[in-house]
Image (spheres, helix red, strand yellow):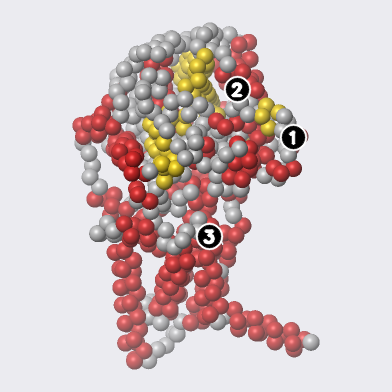
Amino acid sequence: MKATSENKKSYLKKMLETRSTMAVCILLKYVVYYYLIEWSKFSCVYVIISTLITYGLYYSISKSKIKHKRLLFGIMYIGFSIFMFADVMYFNYYNQTVSIKQFWQIGNVAKVPESFVATLIPLSIFIISDIPLVLHQFGNSVKEYVDKKTQVKNKKKTGRIVVAIMLVIIIASNPMESASIAKFTGEEFFVNHTNDIIENTVGKMSEDDLSEEEVLKLISENKSQTSFSGNYSGIAAGRNVIMVQIEAMQKCMIGKDYNGITLTPNINALIQNDTLYFDHFYSNVGKGNTADAEFTVFNSLYPSSERECYTLYEKNNFRGLPWLLKNSGYSTMAFHGYEGSFWNRQNAYPYQGIDNYYSMEKLNQDDIIGLGISDKSVFSQAVNIMKQSKGPFFSFVVTLTNHHPYVMDESMWEIPILDEDKDSKFASYLQTVHYTDEAIGQFINELKENGLYDNSIIIFYGDHHGLNKDMDDNDIYMSRFLGKKYDYDEMSKVPLIIHIPGSGVHETISKIGGQIDVLPTLANLMNIQLDERYVLGQDILNEEKGFVAFTAYMPEGSFITDGAMYELSRQKIYDTGRAWNPDTGESLLVEDYKAYYDKALNLKKASIQLLDHNYIPALK
């Protein structure tokens, strides 16, 4: 029996060390990879190509005369595997593969490990689990000594490696701008990332920089010029400004019941009195998510697709909402129940015009839920600080309890969950949404009790989606909840609520708008003078047609306007994208919306040029 057992172990060891087993592992690695980043009709071809490239490198390097070949192949294979794993993680959240630009954001990801773990797909572990086997087999394949005849052959094999690498680079750069090659470069692993590296190195150096005059001309040609007069002009002039960015609050939660319970009773009541409610309002965040939402709201500029603007443009000149109010005699403050260094807020806020930032370190950590201090506690502490202001103030509060992965002790759950929804991210999300609504109700009451309510304009808006349609079977749960297909239109739609106590206004505005439009809209309501040359949004109370360009989750060039939403394909070819009516779900002809696509790219380009060159003059 012992001999038989040893024979089985020996057989298994030999089987694992064969090249065919290793080749199968590599093949399965790519099957899993393409499956997890959305299997397409060409994925079988991509699996074969990626496997051949990998095995070709394996075989050629192992038989070549390259020095330190074990180290070279080990670095390459581990690098490939890490990139593939990062792609899967990133795609699961952003619906895009990762770029070398996003590797700088690893520090921010590490600060929210609960979200990272919740985003992890168990099957993705297979992508890195084969590394020991492949590297061990490579070591067995390397011949330390070769005869002279073999050396000649090996020189040829080394040349083949160079030729193969050059071929990948040429295909990735697509010098003839072939549409067929563009489709390939957008999905095949090696060509896609080679193309990304080229674009972010050589491509960056070859990009045309625009002068300030050219940028301002591009802006004026691609956006309406807001008049800052008309509907509701000046009705909130001189008031305190209290702005609340609600973490991960989607519009579809507002006014909805679940299993007999109203999810947002306090927000619902707020909307019914003295409020302008925007029910077709969209998040246009970049890769900085929450931080980019506030950056856009403050400045009416589009974020970068590279990383958070608070790091990229920390010390730029800005003339956004905090600065404009500060120059009018307002004190400025911000509150957040997490670490001050997160998304570089503590360094960036002074350049945004925020005088005092009350982060987790400066607040009483008396009630922790999920990532940080609970919304109810942060709101109460913020009110206590606001009431000490001697004159008009701008107060910016970022909520946190409704942050992915929506962790809250079940003893605090108030929404009874249906059997069909139990143990889902959707169920957890409902609970934290309901909690944040309770916190908002408490906040309004505390403002009233402390004499801060009547002379303020209070703005609530969502920063980004809560439930990604491509994660955790959210599309299934949300489609059932909504009674229609859960797509990017509902996923990207967040609430904007402008509450003006005692104004008597009560209107729901269904024109398309986005975070890019908040500054000019508030400027109209408060009689704030803007230098519109540096404002990319529009006053959605008075403009005839809405428009929002997107940066994350859908490729740049994607947009929404009244009656139409367009998603650019991963291959970044306009004609292979899709367009639909966000209200009816009806498919639309993409050729009818090319002008809007060009507008989206032009506005994004103008915004990045303004920021990259710091063209915005400082306020005097």
Q: Residue at x 66, y 84 (%)?
A: 10
Residue ID at (63%, 26%): 264
Query: Which residue is identified by label 1?
Result: 416
* C-alpha distance separating marks 1 and 2: 20 Å
Residue 539 position, x and y percent, is 38, 22
Q: Where is mark 3, residue-wise?
A: 35
Query: x, y percentage for residue 230?
Result: 36, 13
Q: Earlier in the sequence, mark 3 or mark 2?
A: 3
Q: CA distance from mark 1 to mark 3?
A: 35 Å
State how far apart marks 3 and 2 are (Cα).
Answer: 41 Å
Three-letter amino acid code of the residue under disc 1: Pro
User: In the drawing, does residue 372 fall left or right of residue 229?
Assistant: right
Residue 370: tell me if it is visible.
Answer: no
Secondary structure of the residue carrying tag 2 is helix
Instruction: Say which element carries label 1.
Output: loop
Rendered position, 287 above or below 100: above
Q: Is residue 286 above or below residue 128?
A: above
- Most foreground residue, 177 or 412: 177
